Amino acid sequence: MLGRSIRLQVSATAAGGKTDKPRVQRKAAAPLPGSPPAAGTPAPVPGGTPPRMPPPPLAQQPPSAAAPTAWPQQPAAATAPAAAPPPRGASAPVPRPGALSSSDEEMWKLHQELLQQIEERKRSQQGLLKQLDLDPTAAAAVAPPPPTVARPPPPPVTAAPPPTVALPPPPPVTAAPPAVAPPRPAPAVLPRTLEFPTAPPRVAPTPQPVAPPPPPPPPPVAAAPEPVAPAAPAEPVKPHNPNAMNIVFVGAECAPWSKTGGLGDVMQALPKALAARGHRVMCIAPRYKIYDDAWETGVRHRMKVWDSDQEVGYFHAYQDGVDYVFIDHPSYQTWGHEIYGGSREDVMFRCALLSKAALEAPWVVPCGGVPYGEDNLVFVANDWHTSLLPFYLQAHYRDHGKFHFARAVLVLHNVAHQGRAPMDDLQRLEVPEHYRELFRLDDPVGGEHMNIMKAGIITAHRLVAVSHGYAWECQTQEGGWGLHQVFQEHAWKLRGVVNGIDYSEWNPSSDPHLQSDGYVNYDTDTLDKKRQCKMALQKELGLPVNADIPMLGFIGRLDYQKGVDLINDNYEWLMGEGVQLVMLGSGREDLETALRDMENRNKDKCRAWVGFSVNMAHRITAGCDILLMPSRFEPCGLNQLYAMAYGTVPVVHAVGGLRDTVKPFNPFENSGTGWTFEAADSGRFRNSLGDALLTYRQHRDSFTALQLRGMQQDLSWEHAAENYEDVLVQAKFQW
């Protein structure tokens, strides 16, 4: 390499003499400008670089073991002071071409030519990349930078033995390999550049086939992800609610799996409305038969019930944000065809088992993989069938340090059924001695007896009646059924909340039961289509098809409470008015016989469907013009709400929830949603029916306005769920 220093190992003596004292080994310094070179030394080149011969080919290089040449010592006066060696790693200055000898100048030109070829190849590569629509800067970033020719470090200074003077190989021989090294590794460092020619590429059609295809057009607006987003999550996103709680509903029936009345509808709809408000909700009911959509959790739990050890299983279904849990036990499947059938002991055993199994469910059932636990927990019991739950929560758990922050709310759907039994049955219910007086009730009708609902009323943290009117009636002697004094003492925690309806189940505009057999869906804008449903009902039941004939309907349980006898008392008058009467229900055997008798007497005007059919209930509600509800007492009632939502005008006895939900018609102000009568009397019931038929036949505009006002009401569960949430929050913070 040019400018390399020559290390010399010498042992200097005066005038060629030898000395025993060795000289210090050092680098030979370049002579000062203008000083004559030493004898036997090649003439120096300006700039301090010793000249050297161009290196022979590698195959013809002389061996490095050539004999060293003896260098004569210069006189002391003519010797120039040695220059300081350059720092380690520093490169010598590159000489100008005019200052080099012919051999060094050729080497410099060769070096320049190699650099020029490298630059040309870079430009050629960038041209090809531009033709391929690629970013040259990105390709340049990927390619490694060209190697820099760095001076190798000088060999270490080693001291030679004193008697021997060893000189390094001549500079031309040792410097030859590094001089050739810079241009040779270039192809190895930049392997990709060898693939391109040095000359500019020819313009050829070859780049077009390999060019990437044009980007596809942007997707249309209809293909945006918004339409498919609602179907992605399996579980609806619950809104943030600062009052969110873990709520457990417990009831003897739950629609659509089991139902005998309005309780089943409430157990189906109210939990969904509360879940939509951000609560985590579980609904517990017995497993009366095999439910295809309920899966076994694998949890089996043993407990003591009725002085015996019982084992229950838990089945789970998740729908509309609610965990539906079903208690599996042989006693439930035995009476699945008749939910409240069996002896008094059988019914009481099933109710006690349901209450105890429900209290264990938040601990043992992993709904969604995680049990509810006992924190922020509220149980909602329904009617006397689960009135033991508030008592068990207090006596068997809270008194022993369990469920300390759990609360219980009792919902009163019908206080006429209270769970009465002899006091001796208390020992079978695992009632501690100091709690026995909670169950004792002495009234003129039943005498002294055990009353399960009374214990539930006292131990519950809050009470909810299913309407404002029914909350007041429970505190009266007629409506309290012997418990009116107990309700009066606990009136501070009693509140009335009117039920709602589930529009996903009861909606004339989307009802699936009105989409076949000549029935059609309708709403307030297409109310005239209700006539088509009426004619389809007449055809299905085998009655004369005439849309102008008033059609009256009844749907409900056949017992004394529902006032079916009032309809029977006015039967002959109704047939004389030229109406069609359709009745659906089951219950007392004598009332079922009365319905069959009414149909047999006038088969062209009356139809009696003994039993229950969900499909027929929807079609009767849509096809009839007037719905009859002469109930002697009605805590809330749902059929009048369904009727108003379908444009069917109700005629009701003004009691309980019927008074709260049906506003009497005022022909002078053109207001109201139906007709009411004040007493459970056949005559007053007939008068209200006469007014309704007169309005239908002679004042059709007023009757249509009644239908529209009923359909335009907001009868959903959202408002009722908000009121229930207030009650649950009050129970949560009660100590």
Image: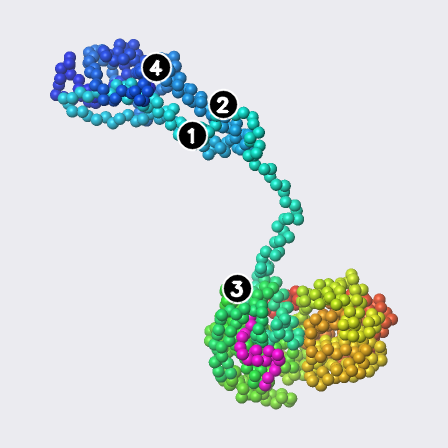
Instruction: Look at mark 3 in the image and give the residue it sits on.
Output: 368
Three-letter amino acid code at disc 2?
Ala
Secondary structure under tag 3 reads helix
Q: Considering only vertical position in the picture, is 636 above or below 101?
A: below
Question: Which residues lie in the magenta part?
Answer: 325-343
N-term mark: 4 or 1: 4
Q: CA distance from mark 2 to mark 1?
A: 18 Å
Three-letter amino acid code at disc 1?
Leu
Question: Residue 171 at x, y = what percent?
Answer: 28, 19
N-term mark: 3 or 4: 4
Q: CA distance from mark 3 to mark 4?
A: 88 Å
Magenta span includes 637: no
Q: Residue at x 63, y 71 (%)?
A: 256
Q: Residue furthest right?
A: 698
Secondary structure under tag 4 reads helix
Three-letter amino acid code at disc 3?
Gly
Instruction: Look at mark 4 in the image and give the residue it sits on.
Output: 103
Q: CA distance from mark 3 to mark 2?
A: 71 Å
Magenta span includes 339: yes
Question: Residue 524 at x, y = what percent?
Answer: 77, 63
Q: Residue at x 55, y 88 (%)?
A: 423
Question: Residue 204 at x, y = what percent?
Answer: 56, 27
Does residue 168 appear in the picture of this structure?
Answer: no
Image color mode: rainbow
Mark nearest the camera among 2 and 1 is 2
Instruction: Look at mark 2 in the image and give the residue it sits on.
Output: 199
Q: Residue furthest left?
A: 20
Q: CA distance from mark 2 to mark 4?
A: 30 Å
| Residue 190 disc label | 1
N-term mark: 2 or 1: 1
Give the class, few, some or many, for how many residues have Cα within 10 Å of label 2's Cα (few <14, many ≥20): few
